[in-house]
Image (cartoon, grey):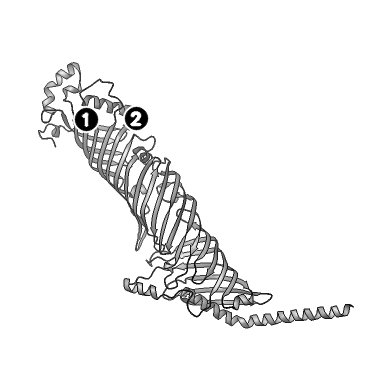
Amino acid sequence: MRKPWLVAGGIVLAILAGAAIWLTNKANQLEPELRARLIAYLESRFDGEVNIDKLDIAGVPRVEVRVSGIRVHRRGDRYPVVVAKSLRFHADYLDLFGEIKHINLVRLEGFELTIPPKREKPPGEAEASKSAQPKPSEGSVPAVVVDQVVADNTLLRLVPRDPEKPLRDFELYGLRLLGVGAGKPMTYHAKLKNYKPPGIVDSTGTFGPWVPGEPGESPLSGNYTFTDADLGVFKGITGTLQSTGKFGGELGHIEAEGETRVPNFALKMANQQVPLTTHYKAIIDGTSGNTDLVPVDAMLNKSPFRVSGSVEGQKGVKGKEVRLAVKMTAARLEDFMRLSVKGNPPIVGALAYDGHIDIPRGDEQVVDKIGLDGTFVLNGARFTSKEIQDKIDELSRRGSGHPGDEEIDRVRSRMRGRFTLRDTVLRFSELHYEVPGASVDVIGTYGLKSEEIAFAGTFRMDATVSETFKGMKSIMLKPFDRLFSRKGQGTVLSIKIEGTRAHPKFGLDAGRTFKKADK
């Protein structure tokens, strides 16, 4: 009874052993063919010369393939477009050698993807080249479909147009590519390590199809989150940035839109935290890093403003130059003063500003190299120091000809001006200050770091000199009214303001004051 079963079992084992031996031999015979097919496929996909150090195949019970030392070098480029330490996958024979090659899972180790800069061509030639570019799925190489590619440690490298500039490297963690097939976009999920500011960008979206002749034209889109980015790596500022957004376009031309939140933004010179949020639109050149902002709507605490401009590099020069146009119509002066002044803002009020910001390249602190120019209007301003505000109230009383009128209290000031900021020095070509009954027009400079003041100008009051006092003093000053008045009314004095912000010195410029002409 046992003998037939033993015989049958032996036959089955013999058949299986023979099949295993046959499959192994078949796998070994397939190695040259599979190598040739893999090289042809990679050459078609990446338009480059392919080198493979080693290819191993095991044929039981399925085809298992391990490829080591993969390099794809695109013709005319300095760096290989693809480098992989190893590539591993397994598949059924029918899936691998059918008309459509199907692979369930591919694992990549030591994967590096290098995006070269777009080759510059005349417009007509560029369009003709693009229209003539064969689709990745076209040609004699059979289609290959991969369900999932896993590459846990990937290096994305962007080559700048300027050969003197360093490569831009980005580390990708947990990269997953789904639905990888020639001529089709693939879905991806990856975490990218950002270096400046440092943090992790988590992104999902679609990529491809890959454009072999011009990788920078390969489509890219997705959504991202960027958390806990430390702005302290930039000289002169501090804060922790959170950002979310979406993007789309091509690797060489990405349009992005999103929001940023920095609840603790500060300039190191004052070290006072002010919340900053933005909603931005930007056009990014992935190969150069240049960015156009179009535009950015920002909110510094309670102050809205709009920014547009560019962040650009220059051949042979380290760093980026920031050039921005800034416009605000309903901001609060105190929000901006908290960034640059230690302690409580000395003055508060409604601020309108129209101007430009220029931050050149270099290792200096932002406050040392930033440039500003523009015009501003400050309405409803009030000084936070009671001592100073009392003096402003007194100025308004006397200037209006109502000295001692205590109902004139907590008066609001108005200011407008035109200025430039270079090398930490504010230069005012026009500065007008007024309260009810009095006004001041001056030009001069103020040092942001030194806090030194040097202004000269004209002080005017509606009242005559004698009207600024009461009683006997008013009577005694009556003869001097004509001396200090212009066109028979009011008071006009030429003044100078010197010293520091903490200890200003106000003086009368007698030479100009007693001239008949009011200049």
- 156, 271: nearer the viewer: 156
Element at label 2: loop
Residue 157, numbered circle: none
Give the percent coordinates (x, y) of residue 419: 26, 44
Give the percent coordinates (x, y) of residue 104: 60, 69
Relative height, residue 187 to residue 332 (above, below): below
Element at label 1: strand
Q: Residue at x 30, y 43 (%)?
A: 353
Relative height, residue 165 to residue 382 (above, below): below
In the image, 478: left or right of 294? left
Relative height, residue 323 to residue 48 (above, below): above
Separation of residues labelled 2 and 1 (CA atoms): 20 Å
- The residue that disc 1 covers is 438
Within-10-Å neighbours for mark 2: few <14, some 14–19, many 20+: few
Q: Residue furthest front?
A: 99
Q: Which residue is drawn at 20% across and 21% down?
A: 469
Q: In which quarter of the image is residue 62?
A: bottom right
- The residue that disc 2 covers is 385
- 450, 135: nearer the viewer: 135
Which amino acid type corresponds to the residue marked 2 in the rendered image? Ser
Q: Between disc 2 and disc 1, whose residue precedes? A: 2
Q: Quadrant of residue 459?
A: top left
Which amino acid type corresponds to the residue marked 1 in the rendered image? Ala
In the image, 32: left or right of 510? right
